[in-house]
Image (cartoon, rainbow, N blue to C red):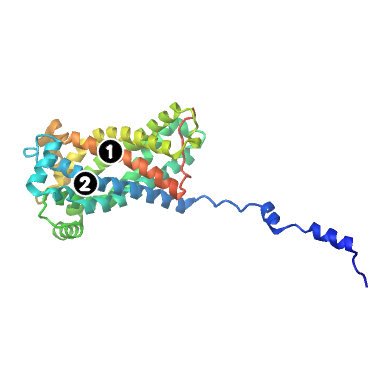
């Protein structure tokens, strides 16, 4: 019977590789796959929902003041700060949070469709035109993508926005979102109650969103060009700062462009229209009554509100997307 020699046993023992060495030399575990398809767009949508809901809800007091200035200029005619004081003195500080529920809920839904839809449509246009051609057509792509996304988002937003405006203009109408929503539906129906302001909301939101995304993209592109470090090597704090600055610029531009339609939206949702009166005739009548100056009532408050919330939206949206790993969107800015 064969018996290994002592030297053979010793060589076999020293040839055994320790387990820690085996683990150290084994192939690294594959990196987690990046989200794509529906998973990716769901993350885009959630980031958009959070950023829009948080910013709009936080600025509810400014929105209340802006709406009151548009609806009752004969009462609130001494500026935004004075209007804050008037409302607080007459109705209590709680009145400045009127419509908080519809605002938070409405813009959560709208933000999901807006930001998620923007990324979706941008991808469709880029693939249709061709990745190599997209930088030359980036402005039309931004404008078309944001317009389509906003149209769908407004279908979801309109009922809650109508409820918010009715609560702000008539504080005794209902005690909150659910009560106001159900009363409006019961008394005026879907079309007259919820969608009488759909035309104005499109006239306001579509140009606003087109300016918002296009100006943001161009502003960010130019800011990054001034920074010598490539974007992918920048710390997250710098990217957040760029998002804030670009968002502020885009918000101011978007506020000015959409102001007339915002005034009409507030007016048309203030109360019922006359029996048989069409939405178009109401809009024409209101425009004539207000004139150019009247259409820009509350402009200062709106610039403050929209500039601030747009800056916040893009900053929060970028941070949430980064936390969710939603980094698969298309960027078509021209190279440095």
Q: Is the N terminus in the top left, top right, bottom left or bottom right quadrant?
A: bottom right
Residue 301, quarter of picture: top left
Is disc 1 surrounded by few (<14), some (14 to 19) or many (20+) residues within 10 Å?
many
Q: Secondary structure at mark 1?
A: helix
Residue nearest the viewer, comparing 272 with 214:
214
Give the image location of residue 134, x and y in percent: 47, 34
The x and y percentages for residue 200 are: 21, 43
Element at badge 2?
helix
Whether residue 285 is visible, yes or no, is: no
Classify residue 172 by image quadrant.
bottom left
Q: Nearer the viewer, residue 7 or 145?
A: 7
Q: Circle 2: is it few (<14), some (14-19), or many (20+) Cα within 10 Å?
A: many
Identify which residue is drawn at 63% across, 52% down: 28
First-in-chain label (1 vs 2) = 2
Q: Position of residue 40 (x, y in %)?
A: 46, 50
Residue under label 1, please give it.
308
Q: Position of residue 196 (x, y in %)?
A: 18, 49
Q: Residue furthest front?
A: 6
Look at the numbered discs 1 and 2 and tell me whether their residues touch, using CB distance below 8 Å: no
The number of callouts visible is 2
Residue 39 appears left or right of 84: right
Q: Is residue 251 visible?
A: yes
Name which residue lies at 9% across and 34% down: 78
Q: Of the numbered discs in the image, which one, if any, rests on residue 60? A: 2
As rendered, which of 104 and 25 lies closer to the eye? Answer: 25
């Amino acid at each position: 019977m064969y018996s290994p020699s002592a030297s053979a046993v010793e060589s076999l023992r020293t040839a055994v590789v320790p387990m820690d060495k085996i683990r150290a030399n084994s192939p690294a575990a594959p990196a987690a796959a990046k989200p794509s398809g529906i998973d990716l767009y769901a993350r885009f949508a959630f980031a958009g929902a959070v950023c829009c809901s948080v910013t709009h809800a936080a600025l509810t007091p400014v929105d209340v003041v802006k709406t009151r200035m548009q609806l009752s200029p004969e009462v609130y005619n001494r500026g935004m700060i004075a209007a804050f004081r008037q409302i607080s003195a007459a109705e209590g500080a709680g009145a400045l949070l009127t419509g908080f529920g519809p605002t938070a809920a409405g813009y959560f839904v709208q933000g999901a469709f807006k930001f998620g839809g923007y990324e979706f449509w941008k991808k469709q246009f880029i693939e249709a035109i061709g990745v190599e051609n997209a930088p030359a057509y980036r402005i039309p792509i931004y404008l078309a993508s944001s317009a389509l996304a906003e149209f769908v988002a407004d279908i979801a937003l309109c009922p809650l926005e109508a409820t918010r405006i009715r609560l702000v203009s008539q504080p005794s109408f209902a005690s909150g979102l659910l009560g106001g929503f159900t009363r409006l539906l019961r008394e005026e129906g879907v079309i007259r109650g919820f969608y009488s302001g759909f035309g104005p909301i499109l006239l306001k939101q579509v140009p606003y969103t087109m300016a918002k995304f296009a100006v943001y993209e161009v502003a960010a592109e130019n800011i990054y060009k001034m920074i010598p470090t490539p974007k992918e090597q920048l710390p997250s704090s710098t990217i957040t700062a760029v998002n804030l600055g670009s968002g502020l610029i885009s918000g101011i531009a978007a506020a000015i462009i959409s102001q007339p339609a915002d005034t009409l939206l507030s007016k048309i949702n203030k109360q019922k229209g006359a029996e048989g009166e069409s939405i178009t005739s109401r809009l024409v009548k209101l425009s004539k009554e207000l004139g150019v100056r009247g259409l820009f009532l509350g402009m200062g408050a709106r610039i403050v509100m929209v500039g601030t919330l747009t800056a916040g939206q893009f900053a929060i949206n970028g941070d949430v997307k980064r936390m969710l790993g939603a980094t698969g969107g298309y960027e078509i800015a021209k190279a440095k």
